[in-house]
Image (cartoon, rainbow, N blue to C red):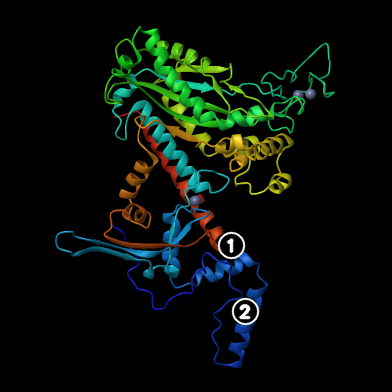
């Protein structure tokens, strides 16, 4: 149910004033009754014209007749930095009687528009929406670990691992060390065929310009790097297929026999490393044949799963299509592999459920830009790569995507369309169907608790009569400032509520 302003607008507003560029000058100079009044009004108008554009825009906004309702809308979007503007209506009828149960129309809204969240997952694009997305990710991952949101709490007793699969080496890169040791010490020195030193005695800082870049760009296998990236999804699929196979071999069962008693579910995220290659972190869980509701077979254990994970990852071999220029590459996972059992509470050798869920949630808000110097937008031409402000190594990876993307044998990998993510074309978070709930379900649940514009999206499918149109996006200068303030207030309120809750929990009972 949507509630909206009780007072219908007395006049229509020109579209785009909240979203578009600020108008020139204040529009409300009421003619004074005396020449002195008029002079004062003109002086006030002149003073306003002196104000910076943002202040001007703020004053204009506050003078709007439906300003309070606009504030409500922005609050409903959580102070989203780039809201989507919609115009339209939704009418819900009783199917039996035809009676109108509910009617909502944006004609009653400020500038006849409804603002909706942009829902961008990246903190660099929209801080409030990325916070919401991180929260949803936390609940999505956590539900698969400890239950909740349609997942039974018994999943806690299923064998569960936190697995990290890495990319193989494509050539030596400058690296940061945790113990303050030099990058790549080499007593005998020596140079590669391109005249670059084979060692490096520098101690690099994590955000330093060298970290992650190759010792010799000539020796670095750029085609292998981007082709590996483009196959990450298939490498993962091959890994999970192998996992069934290796578990069957370990327990002396047939593959079909195993699949009748056991199911593997997972949630995984891709994380960009300094060298611009993704690592895959995944929660892998063993369920019974009916998914999370059924217990895994008695013989299945976290130790057995760990053994199977190691052998299954090592056995993955894929081949790239043959190219006259490059031949055929064999693709594998990197030798570095981490698999740790998950426990409900922190123990020295295991990770806690909450720590893993929080870790995953933190990563989904990052983009290729923040970690590996990729770009947030698609690359349209070779010039975009040349002019992009990215490190040399990233540019070389993008150029390789562009070059290989033009070769017919690699056309299906769409390397040019994914040059901004360095060839990687998967989602940041993916999960198997039975792992836990979905982002959609979490949003629907949230919408049920609200009585504002956010519910419109959910109602679009169920309404008998609805018509919606995209009318723009974003904020004007002043509106953006107000939205950021609202987002900050909401974040502070949440923080205070959390502290109060933690304080209550910490207090001894009775
Ligand atoms: Zn947003
Ligand atoms: Zn170095
Ligand atoms: Zn070299």
49 or 10, nearer to the observer: 10
**Which residue appears at 62% of the width and 24% of the height?**
328
Secondary structure found at label 1: helix
Quarter holding the C terminus is top left
Task: Kindly report which numbered mark, 1 or 2, lies closer to the viewer in this rendering.
Answer: 1
Exactly how many numbered labels are in the figure?
2
Image vertical order of residue 478 relative to residue 417, above or below = below
Q: Residue 477 has which mark? A: 1
Image vertical order of residue 65 relative to residue 262, above or below = below
Image vertical order of residue 505 relative to residue 305, above or below = below
Where does residue 57 sit, x and y in percent of width and height?
58, 68
Where does residue 203 sit, x and y in percent of width and height?
75, 23
- Residue 507 in sight: no
Q: Quadrant of residue 6?
A: bottom left
Q: Quadrant of residue 65?
A: bottom left
Q: Residues within 10 Å of mark 1 (few under 14, many from 20)?
A: some
For disc 2, the marked residue is: 45
Secondary structure found at label 2: helix
Q: In this image, 268 relative to 407: left or right? A: left
Q: In this image, 122 relative to 405: left or right? A: left
Quadrant in which ligand 2 is drawn: top right
For the view shown, which residue lies furthest in the front direction? 324
- Using the numbered discs, state the Cα–Cα distance from disc 1 to disc 2 in whole angstroms: 20 Å
Q: Quadrant of residue 225?
A: top right
339 or 344, nearer to the observer: 339
**Which residue appears at 71% of the width and 24% of the height?**
173
Where does residue 257 sit, x and y in percent of width and height?
30, 14
Q: Residues within 10 Å of mark 2 (few under 14, many from 20)?
A: some
**Which residue appears at 32% of the width and 62% of the height?**
466
Does mark 2 have its CB less than 8 Å from ligand 1? no
Label 1 close to label 2 by CB (< 8 Å) = no
């Amino acid at each position: 149910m949507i509630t909206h302003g009780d007072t219908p607008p007395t006049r229509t507003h020109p579209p785009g004033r909240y979203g578009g560029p600020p108008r020139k000058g204040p529009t409300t100079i009421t003619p004074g009754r005396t020449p002195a009044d008029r002079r004062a009004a003109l002086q006030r108008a002149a003073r306003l014209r002196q104000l910076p554009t943002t202040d001007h825009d703020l004053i204009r906004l506050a003078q709007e007749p439906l300003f309070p309702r606009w504030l409500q809308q922005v609050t409903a979007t959580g102070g989203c930095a780039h809201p989507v503007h919609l115009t339209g209506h939704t009418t819900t009828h009783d199917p039996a009687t035809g009676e109108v149960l509910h009617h909502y129309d944006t004609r009653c809204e400020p500038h006849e528009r409804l603002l909706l969240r942009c829902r961008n997952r990246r903190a660099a694009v929209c801080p409030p929406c990325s916070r919401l997305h991180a929260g949803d990710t936390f609940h999505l991952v956590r539900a698969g670990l400890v239950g909740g949101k349609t997942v039974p709490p018994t999943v806690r007793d299923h064998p569960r691992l936190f697995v990290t699969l890495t990319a193989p080496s494509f050539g030596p890169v400058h690296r940061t060390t945790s113990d303050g040791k030099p990058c790549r010490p080499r007593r005998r020195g020596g140079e590669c065929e391109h005249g670059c030193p084979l060692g490096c005695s520098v101690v690099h800082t994590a955000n330093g310009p060298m970290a992650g870049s190759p010792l010799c760009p000539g020796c670095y296998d750029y085609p292998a790097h981007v082709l590996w990236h483009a196959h990450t999804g298939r490498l993962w699929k091959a890994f999970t297929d192998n996992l069934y196979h290796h578990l069957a071999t370990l327990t002396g069962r047939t593959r079909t026999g195993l699949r009748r008693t056991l199911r593997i579910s997972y949630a995984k995220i891709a994380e960009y490393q300094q060298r611009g290659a993704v690592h895959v972190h995944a929660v892998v869980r063993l369920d019974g044949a009916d998914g999370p509701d059924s217990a895994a077979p008695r013989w299945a254990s976290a130790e057995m799963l760990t053994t199977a994970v190691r052998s299954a990852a090592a056995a993955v071999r894929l081949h790239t299509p043959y190219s006259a220029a490059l031949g055929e590459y064999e693709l594998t996972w990197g030798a570095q592999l981490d698999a740790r059992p998950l426990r409900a509470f922190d123990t020295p050798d295991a990770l806690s459920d909450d720590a893993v869920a929080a870790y995953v949630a933190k990563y989904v808000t990052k983009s290729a830009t923040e970690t590996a110097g990729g770009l947030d937008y698609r690359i349209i031409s070779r010039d975009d790569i040349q002019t992009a402000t990215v490190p040399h190594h990233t540019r070389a990876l993008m150029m390789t995507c562009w070059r290989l993307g033009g070769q017919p044998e690699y056309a299906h990998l769409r390397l040019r369309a994914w040059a901004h993510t360095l060839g990687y074309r998967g989602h940041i978070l993916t999960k198997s169907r039975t792992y836990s709930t979905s982002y959609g379900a979490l949003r629907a649940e949230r919408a049920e608790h609200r009585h504002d514009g956010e519910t419109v999206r959910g109602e679009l499918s169920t309404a008998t009569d609805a018509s919606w149109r995209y009318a723009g996006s974003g904020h004007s200068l002043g509106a953006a400032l107000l939205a950021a303030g609202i987002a900050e207030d909401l974040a502070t309120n949440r923080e205070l509520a959390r502290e109060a809750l933690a304080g209550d929990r910490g207090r001894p009972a009775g």
